[in-house]
Image (cartoon, rainbow, N blue to C red):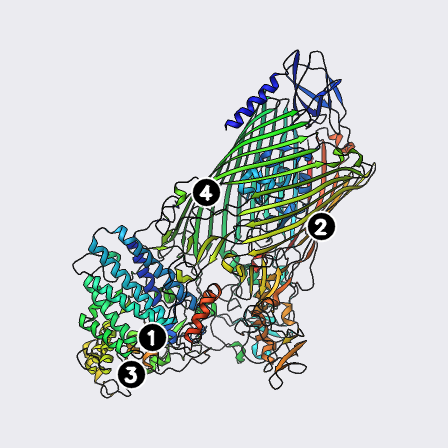
Amino acid sequence: MRKIASLLTVLMLLCAFAFAQTRTVNGQIKNDKGETVPFATVVETGNTKNATKADADGFFSLKIKEGSTITISAAGHEDKTVAPSSGVMNIVLVTTGAMKEVVVTTALGIKRRPKEVGYANTTVKGDQLTAGKAPNVGAALSGKVAGLTIYNTNQAVNSTPRIVLRGNRSITGENQALIVLDGVAVPSNTISYLNPNDIESVTVLKGGEGGILYGSEGANGVLLITTKKGNNAKPQISVSSSVNLDQIAYLPKFQKEFGSGSGYGFTWYDNFRPFENQQYGDPYDGSIRGAGRKSPDGKWLELPYQFVPNVRKKIWDVGVTTQNDVSISGGDANSTYYLSLSSANVHGVVPKDEYHRNSVRFNSSKTYGKFKASFDGTFTTDHSQRTNADFYFYALNTPGWIPLDKLKDWRNNYFANPNGYFNDYYNNPWFELDNNRNDGRNNYFNGNFTLDFKPTSWLDVFFRAADAVTNSSGKSWTNRFDYTDYAKGLLADKPITEDPRYNDYSYVWRARNSPIVGGVSDGMSYGNRFNTDLLITLNKTFGDFTTKLILGNNMQQRTSNSVNVSSSNVIIPDLFNVSNRSGEPGASEGNTTLHKVGNYADLTLGYKDYLFVHGSVRVDMSSAFFFHGKNVAGEDSTRATKLYTYPWYGGDVSIILTEAVPSLKNDILNYLKLRAGWNRNGNDNLGVYSLVPTFSPGGGFPYGSTVGVTVNNTFPDPNLQPEFFYTTEAGFEATLWKNRINVDFSWYNTKANNQVMQQQVSSATGYTVINLNAAKVNNNGIEAEVRGTVYKNKDWTVDLNANYSYNTNKVVSLIGGLDRIQLNGDGSRAQIFAQVGKPFPYLVTTHFQYDSVTGKTIIDPNNGWPLLATGAVNFNNPALSSLLPQGTTTPKHDLGLGFRASYKMLTLAASAEYRGGYVVYSALGNTMSFTGSSAKTTLYHRQPFVWPNSVYYDNSTSKYVDNTSIAVREDIANYLGWGDYGFSNGTLANGDFFVSSGAFWKIRDASLTFNFPQRWISKLKVVRTASLAVFGRNLYTWLPKDNYWTDPEFSNTTGNGVGINVTGNTPPARQYGATLNVNF
Amino acid sequence: MDPKNPSTAPSYALFTNAQHTLMNTLTSSNVNLNIFRLIVQYWQETTYTDESNYDLSTRAINDAVWNSLYRDVLRDLQEAKNLIPKDVGDATTQKNELAITDIMAVVTWYYLVTTYGNIPYSEALDINNPFPKYDDAKTIYYDLLNRLNTDITNLTTSGGSFGGADIIYGGDIAAWKKFANSFKLKMGMTIADDDNTKAKTTVESAVAAGVFTSNADNAVFHYISTPPNTNPIWVDLVQSGRKDFVAASTIVNTMKALNDPRLDNYFTLDANGGYTGGNPGASSNYATFSKPDETITAPDFPATLLSYAEVEFFLAEAVERGYSVGGTAQQHYNNAVTASILEWGGTLAEAAAYLAQPSVNYLTAPGTWRQKIGIQKWIALYNRGWDEWIEWRRLDYPQLSPAIDAVSAIPLRYPYPVNEQNVNRANYEAASTAIGGDLVTTKLWWDKY
């Protein structure tokens, strides 16, 4: 602190010398549209040595001789010379349409000139985000920024996407980017409820360097969201209304040949059962058959035994989203305000799924001389009503001859009611939809208050207090349903028909074996994140040198609280209250508090406006790393007495070569900047209380009044440290051909060491998991962006942009010589690992044995069906190894293309994305094979066949011999091989069967906007501009042939182990709609 | 501090939880955890017959048992032992509590070592050693006997202990002493075929110190009739609403042939008003066959850890093996059968009539003493599948045929957990080799015949 104080003294002294026969001019520069003009040059007219630069908000202060005037020049504006006046001058420049100086918003809302920034960043403007009317900011960013991968992991009405910059670094910790709203770090779910129309721009800081000032939270890159503010102009009112339709785009490939049945006999004729969920019966023949069982009055649901076309598509709704926004903004010379109201109503593709969101946002600012104060607040309330039932799963368990779309009325139609529904094992999806539901409400408040004090042109003191509060309540319930005695088979025990295939049981299996007792779970939670920032910015020019020093302090307190009560039954049907139960209720509560303090300094040195050196350092103290008390060995923890801090730091340099060496500049190359940086940052997201071994109440306690507690299963190493990331990056930015083309290229390498691993240990230790610092991962890649105006004349503008990124990582080592740890899986048949020597997440699966010499499949000569490999795991020689390496499940290549053409008042914009270089596993495919609904189960039409390219082991010659004659046994060909979990080497046990390339091409969004000509709307007087747009999203997806199932972006997790899609994801949808915007 | 999960806990609460978890594990009928009733053919599954056919891997039952005993019982007992010296001021009480805690640990180790064979022991329960080596089963066993002897010596009848936190004996030191000696008798007899000398001294010293003398001594864990403190069988069979189990034909037919008075205590009437059971391994219609009796499936039906009947069977066997325990084999056999019938709610008259039958009478019943004791013990240990599994392997009676769709022979041990194979591979492989292969058919050291 003493050093800083003396530096301040020096800086003050320097200013004092200039005090003689002068006056100080203060002012703010704006353009003729009322927008502030940043970084303009202000010169004492005729004395170019006495100059200054305005700041990012257009403010400047310059001392000039009495009687002099000042000249202001800014890129994209006409120069202007004015005489000084007292007070804060308002200087208005006239725009010329040429390239303007832009501002890059960096960490904590600090605005910088692009020249100064020595690390990769990309800014996406609000209109680019809202062109496709994506439901949330995450989806809107897909494919628009090199290095940014958005995983839209499911189709739910209120889903939160996974947002990753530059691939995965941390095996078990956080890899998602930090979300920052108007300078303040906010919880990651903010992105799912923020109104896209309120967004001015999103700046993506890709590496850890840009996030150093956020400490460890910024280690995975930062998405800086800047919301719209008012401006110092007349009030403007904007009204926007849009309607968006969601329609199932495509479904998996279904088989259309076989109806209900399972493994009851040897032939498919024997296998037919009208009450089966599985679809391994005899081929459809069009005959009339009874589905399920007879009703008490002897009636039967008689149906033609033939596939009902599109039956599984008809059950989904056309989703409808309507969104209405109103905003008003304006201000006067010293103040601004912005108010917006938004209402969105979503009806999902899953019938009866609803989501409603209302938000109000207000911000305002006021300048009082050297003070500026602002307030920004958003209140959002949302309400979702969804089914908990896996509707898709139930639909797949319905054979194709059952007209599911006609069985909706389960209350009145006996054959749709649980008592009479044909399916013995799974209930009517329409019944499940109504009787297994979740109702969730969230109230979010996000707000901040800032105070900015600018005593002189070179000093700025800024304070901000911000709060993000979430209050949630949620109720899940399943209703009670009492089966009739008839359904349970208690009244009659007689065969249905003479045909033995109808007479497995005389009762509905479900009714007898799985009573629907119901249950209710009701919970509330509260989360608060209070944050303060104090920033002192010092800007000073010394001859050819410019300096910018920022000193700051950040304090955070995060608290959370949750309470949940539940019952495991419902006594009176339709009354969903925990008190309507028998037995003890379940109850749980959780409370956490985390404190974090960070101090930081950030210095930028510029030389002649073309060379910039920048360095930042932040020292974090987190309560997560304090450990008071004794460790398990009974020793005093070293941390009880020592203040534990972690420093994060980095530096970067950028040089504008075209200005350093002006001869480089020519008609083709207009601008060239080189940059390089290095930083150390890391994850400390251990979670609160991770260093303390804890106890929980034992199961089945309290026992009367006696308590029982148990040692928790995770052993925390009290000496845990954060994970450390060391990143090196370099790149260049160039502007070509009269500023028409912009190119940006980056290369980076991150070594992520000291990773916190949840190591599985022998449970003979009494624990199952130990948290340790171990494991190293290397991550590297390149990013390239090209954007430009390829054609422009009076009427036409055609812009194109492309971005490409390549990313790969490699697990260097794990704890203690371990080869792999599991991140995700679908039983033993597919597992997603972090595997030493491979990129992670890495998919391995079980597979059929193959001859390592010829690559041919090895069959069992007794039945003609392939053998499942069961040997020891060996990735170097996987032929007989029980696990086959498949590849990484995150894309190596990601290419985004954007196009925008405008002709007079029409604008056509579209963007597309390709991802490739990875594989996915479809647990959905496995479910579909079990049910027999998948087209992949009829590859050989379920008839005996000779397995293609197969060999068998010939005992007499001890060699593998080509198999040309041993056909698959009939019962295996028609059922066991495809749909029986009990058949140990069937396809269901063979994970390899459900792996496909993850590649895709998608048209992410397309829109056509019509701007109403001024001569039309000028008659309306009040209307300033108006536009009408039609748009579509995910209009088309191209998938490789081996992907029979679904969108490879879908995953059962938003965690680090992505790559397994499931029925819960629901089928992919495409969206289209229209928006009307009117500005008054 | 984690307000939800305390970072300090009272030692007695850890003890109580360990006792509860051990009893739940031994008593459970959950197919994910305890399928010994199916293995010894007391019960039989209705629709999904995987476990009746010894499929341990699908539900990773071998992992579940291991985790439950090591992680959920022994870890808590270990933690209780660490904390008792700090929590309990009175020296005698402290010593008593430590001894009782260690007895519970010895009991737990007994089930582990007789289920898997070689297991981590000397390096176990130490997180500084996340991948412990496996110790020789016999060496472990002898160490357990030493520990049990020390514990018995350390129990001071006049001193205090856990009180209500000990749900089995309410902190009664005399009862614990009797239990420890009775369990020592059990442990001695278990190894009689392998090391007769050691068995003889162990059994004789246990009996001399005083073992159970009536059903009042039984080690019984009382459940409460309201959830969540109920008998796990009620949870599995009644609360869940599932209909997964019926009687097995093997035991029903045997008991019918012997006119066993316990039949109506064990099973319900079948659809025809008689007693029938499903054939092991075949799917069985729930409605058709007899089912576990309502007494057993009552929420507060107690769980038994060790019974007087069992002790008398051991004594009968000890006489047959020539150990000095007093009495004749027939007397002990009669006491055992009578105690069992009384324990299940029968009368002395029923017991006398039953024993009078030539097929039951110790002098006239068919076969060797192993067969006579084996059959009656099998009947008496009904509902205690795990213990009967040990006795069946040791006595080789009753002679059970494997289930119809058996995936293996009837298990003679459990394979090591899959998790051990994955994370503790080197030690796992060494242990597998040492015991002669990690198979269900590998006989443990005391299982000689």
| Helix, strand or loop status at disc 4 | strand
| Helix, strand or loop status at disc 2 | strand
Q: Nearer the viewer, mark 3 or mark 4?
A: 3
Of the numbered discs in the image, which one, if any, rests on residue A912? 2
* Residue B404 percent location from the top left of the image: 44, 81
Label tally: 4
Quick one: which residue is furthest to the left in this view? B158
* Residue A20 percent location from the top left of the image: 64, 12
Which residue carries the number 4 mark? A526
Of the two numbered discs 4 and 2 on the same chain, state the one appearing first in sequence.
4
Instruction: Give the alpha-carbon distance from disc 1 to disc 4, as whole Å.
Output: 53 Å
Badge 2: chain ID: A
Q: Nearer the viewer, residue A1012 or A1005?
A: A1005
The reply to whether callout 1 and callout 4 are in contact (CB within 8 Å) is: no
| Helix, strand or loop status at disc 3 | helix
Instruction: Give the alpha-carbon distance from disc 3 to disc 1, as whole Å.
Output: 14 Å
Which residue carries the number 1 mark? B390
Mark 1 is surrounded, within 10 Å at the Cα level, by few (under 14), some (14 to 19) or many (20 or more) other residues, namely some
Q: Residue at x 18, y 60 (%)?
A: B156
Mark 4 is surrounded, within 10 Å at the Cα level, by few (under 14), some (14 to 19) or many (20 or more) other residues, namely some
Q: Can residue B166 be seen in this view?
A: no
Q: Can residue A902 be seen in this view?
A: yes
On whether disc 1 and disc 4 are found on a single subunit, the reply is no
Of the two numbered discs 3 and 1 on the same chain, state the one appearing first in sequence.
3
The three-letter code of the residue at mark 3 reads Arg
Q: Which of A481 and B325 is in front in this view?
A: B325
Badge 1: chain ID: B
The three-letter code of the residue at mark 4 reads Tyr
Instruction: Give the alpha-carbon distance from disc 2 to disc 3, as whole Å.
Output: 79 Å
Which residue carries the number 3 mark? B370
